[in-house]
């Protein structure tokens, strides 16, 4: 029995030594080793079963020896296991090494389309002046787009703003002025809002026309609002938008829903007013329509024109984008060609 135990021990030591190499199968071999030498069906266990046939004197000596062998094998197994896991970790770290000096993957960040960028800029300026931003429907009733704005059926202004009709009563809005009516129907003065959004007209596409474009509407209604407030507001806006030396100019005009009405120009921000290609030698660039809200429009929305007055203005975003970035063909703004858009 003693010989058997010694032989077993020697065999186990030989085998465990051969395990101490780094090899993909190593964990599996370790497991096999454990089962073979330390498991319930191991050779050691069967040797120990022979213990019963030993004499009283021999039994404790052999028991001691068997225990010795067992604990030595266990120790060797533990050491081998630790060594293997160290080797495995080292191999893993080696395989997963990151070279921090390699160039990174370059993901080009996107940015706002020039129309959205200018719209946000306009919104920021008016928010700074205490305005609220409101939304309105693009699919609109005839009443809000025309009739409520003093443009009844058969009015000639309908010809200049022909649009797409869903049916005889519902259309795609031609101007954000329709939002004025919604706001005044739902809110009592003081009112101070702007409303940006898409508008539609059945125009043929060319360098300066598109059947869909963007406007920003402005509306202020309160007690004692005058044309001076309109001028001051638009002057502040223009100086923030186009530069602090920008001047504005009002030219008399006609809109059915404002009285008096004006077209508003800003001094050319390219030449400062001397005259250049951008302003076509004029020194001025037309940017918006404006006026004092017509008393009939106020009345229709349940606001007493004897008590309240207001001003409104509307500007085309594309026009401002084109002037600001010196773009001479509007179609470029809708083609979404990244080579064009990435310039801004
Ligand atoms: N809605 C007008 C247009 O599209 C612009 C405008 C808005 C004029 C508000 C006066 C007041 O031409």
Image (cartoon, rainbow, N blue to C red):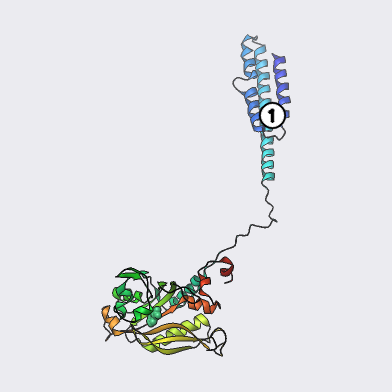
Q: Tell me if 73 is positioned left or right of 308 in this view.
A: right
Q: Is residue 163 left or right of residue 247?
A: left
Question: Image quarter for residue 228?
Answer: bottom left
Q: Nearer the viewer, residue 300 or 327?
A: 327
Name the side, left or right, on which 264 lies relative to 258. Answer: right
Q: Is residue 207 above or below residue 57?
A: below
Is ligand 1 less than 8 Å from the beta carbon at label 1? no
- Quadrant where the C terminus sits is bottom right
Q: Position of residue 306 (x, y in %)?
A: 26, 86
Q: Which residue is mark 1?
A: 76
Secondary structure category for the residue under label 1: helix
Q: Quadrant of ligand 1?
A: bottom left
Closer to the camera in the image, 317 or 26: 317
Image quadrant in which you'd find residue 232: bottom left
Is 114 displayed left or right of 78 in the figure?
left
**Neighbour class for label 1 at 10 Å: few (<14), some, many (≥20)?**
some
Residue at the farthest front position: 204
* Residue 280 visible in the current orientation: yes
- The residue at the point 51 percent across, 72 percent down is 331
Residue 135: x and y in percent read 38, 70
Tell me the residue at 41%/79% (across/down).
Answer: 314
- Which residue is pictured at 65% across the width and 19% down the height? 44
Locate residue 326: give its quadrant: bottom right
Query: Residue 297 location, x and y as percent?
Result: 29, 81
Q: Number of callouts in the render?
A: 1
Between 267 and 30, the one nearer to me in the picture: 267
Quadrant for the N terminus in the image: top right
Residue 183 drawn at (x, y percent) = 33, 74
Q: Can residue 313 be seen at all in this image of the molecule? A: no
């Amino acid at each position: 029995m003693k010989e058997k135990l010694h032989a077993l021990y020697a065999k186990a030591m030989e085998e465990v030594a051969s395990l101490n190499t780094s090899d993909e199968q190593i964990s599996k071999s370790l497991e096999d080793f454990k089962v073979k030498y330390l498991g319930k069906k191991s050779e050691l266990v069967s040797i120990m079963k022979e213990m019963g046939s030993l004499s009283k004197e021999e039994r404790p000596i052999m028991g001691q020896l068997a225990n010795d062998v067992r604990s030595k094998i266990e120790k060797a197994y533990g050491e081998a296991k630790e060594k293997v896991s160290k080797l495995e970790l080292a191999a893993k770290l080696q395989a997963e090494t990151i070279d921090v000096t390699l160039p990174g993957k370059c993901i080009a960040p996107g940015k706002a389309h020039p129309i959205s960028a200018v719209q946000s800029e306009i919104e920021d300026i008016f928010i700074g002046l205490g305005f609220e931003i409101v939304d309105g429907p693009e699919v609109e009733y005839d009443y809000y787009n025309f009739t409520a704005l003093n443009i009844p059926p058969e009015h000639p202004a309908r010809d200049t703003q022909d649009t797409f009709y869903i049916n005889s009563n519902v259309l795609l809005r031609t101007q954000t002025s329709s939002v004025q009516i919604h706001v005044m129907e739902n809110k009592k003065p003081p009112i101070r809002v702007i409303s940006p959004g898409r508008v539609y007209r059945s125009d043929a596409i060319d360098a300066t026309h598109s059947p869909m474009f963007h406007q920003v509407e402005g509306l202020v209604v309160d007690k004692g609002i005058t044309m001076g407030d309109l001028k001051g507001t638009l002057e502040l806006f223009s100086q923030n938008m186009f530069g602090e030396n920008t001047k504005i100019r009002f030219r008399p005009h006609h809109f059915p829903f404002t009285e008096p009405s004006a077209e508003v120009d800003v001094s050319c921000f390219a030449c400062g007013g001397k005259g250049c290609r951008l302003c076509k030698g004029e020194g001025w660039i037309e940017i918006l329509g404006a006026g004092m809200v017509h008393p009939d429009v106020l009345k229709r929305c349940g606001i007493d024109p004897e008590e309240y007055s207001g001003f409104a203005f509307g500007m085309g975003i594309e026009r401002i984008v084109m002037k600001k970035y010196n773009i001479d063909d509007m179609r470029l703004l809708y083609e979404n060609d990244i080579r064009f858009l990435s310039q801004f």
